[in-house]
Image (cartoon, grey):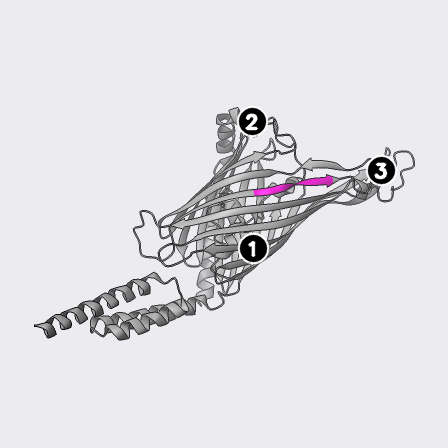
Amino acid sequence: MKKLIKTLTLLAVLSFSGNLFALSYTDVASTLADIFQWSVDSNEGDTTFRSLLIPFGGRTESLGNAFTGLCDDISFLRYNPAGSCIQTNTQFALFHNSWIADSNMETLAYTIRINHLGLSAFASTFYVPFTEYNYFGERVAGNYYSETVGGLNISYNFLAGYTFKGFALGTTAKVGWRSVPDYADDDTGSIISWSGFKQSSMAIMVDAGLMLQFNLFKFYASREPNLKIGIAAQNLGVGITGAFSNSGLSIEAVPTYFAIGLSYKVIKPITITADYKQPVNFINPDGFHWPYLGAGVNIQFAHFLSFLAGLELKGANPKISAGMEFEIAKVRLNMCYSLDLTSSLNPLNKFSLSMKLVLGDLGRAEKSAEVDRLYSLGLQAYTEQNWEKAIEIWEECLKIDKRFDPATTGIVSAQYQIDMFRKIQESLQLD
């Protein structure tokens, strides 16, 4: 019955949001394009492996791709490699992003956190149909142009504790392959073997990131920090073309950028995010690129249902997006609709989906509950002036979680009480 109620609630909200989002967003986007016409980037498109700028889809795209300073699910792999060590749960995810001109991107990803260590892996493929016709309009070749990227991630959250949430550092090593299909000879019309392979390319890259977590102007009770700041360098590397051709190697720039982002939980159900990304071209450093800007909001109606909206600006063309996140029986679904002017002169209605299996936290919640139970027992012993017992219990807390600051503070206080009581007894004996 509860699952039925959740499903009906989701359908009702989706219907309402879909009707609301259909209200002349084309006019809004066109107006925004006029406003930001000054920011047209004349150097845009001078890098290879452009699929690295396409989001996995789902949640992050709904937030205007402002995710560098949030990283609260597996999508961090596209934005900040420091995110794996702060994930609440192990996750396995499938993403589908319907892009432009019949192109799509599919992604498979996995992340696991062991205490303060995060480990992740992903593989992503962007593909678009390629069809070649001869002078008579006859089809002579049909295949797919594709770009496939895979990566391995590791991160660690240093000095993470009850009060100070630590600073997370991470890196992702990535390898990409651009596959060009074989094409036909202009004279004979026959397919030239290995012609596409000779034009294919490899990319070798690395990402690096930092994540900081704080409490600032927090007006609700929660152990989770309400402010996060992320800094990342994405796609540091090069593309290599011509390794299997007679023309020799060619080194190409990949879409490298530096990003800073933040997320702030205003109140418990509402989180706002913002990102600033600065593209750079290390092969041609003289060409200036306008930054990418993004902002988003996440409104959680219930523990299983959230609404997301965002705005992204690349050049003068805005992308307005909205989506829903729905979780039931350890399955988290994200659906995103985007009205996109960033990739075409005409408005594009695009969709992306993600499905994430939430596979548990390796017992971290149980461990935290046991620490809380022991701490409460220590407080009870403390109020009964059984300070030695309180210290003994709180030391058990620290054996489970050495950075549980309340237990450390309690031990110091209890020891102070013991020392004071001993001094009073000694002074009475001297009298």
* Residue ranking furthest to the right: 188
Residue corresponding to mark 1? 154
Residue corresponding to mark 3? 246
Position of residue 30 measured from the top left corner of the image (x, y, whole percent):
52, 30
Position of residue 351 measured from the top left corner of the image (x, y, whole percent):
57, 46
Q: Bounds of the magenta span?
A: 234-240
Whether tag 3 and tag 1 are in contact, CB under 8 A, the answer is: no
Q: Which numbered tag is attached to residue 346?
A: none
Element carrying mark 3:
loop
- Report whether residue 373 is seen: no
**In what quadrant of the picture does the C terminus appear?**
bottom left
**Drawn side of residue 216 relative to residue 383, left or right:** right
**Drawn side of residue 396 relative to residue 234, left or right:** left
Residue name at image x 14 percent, y 70 percent? 424
Q: Is residue 149 above or below residue 223?
A: above
Q: Is residue 348 magenta?
A: no
Q: Is residue 23 above or below residue 420?
A: above
Give the total number of marks visible in the rendering. 3
Earlier along the polypeptide chain: callout 2 or callout 1? 2
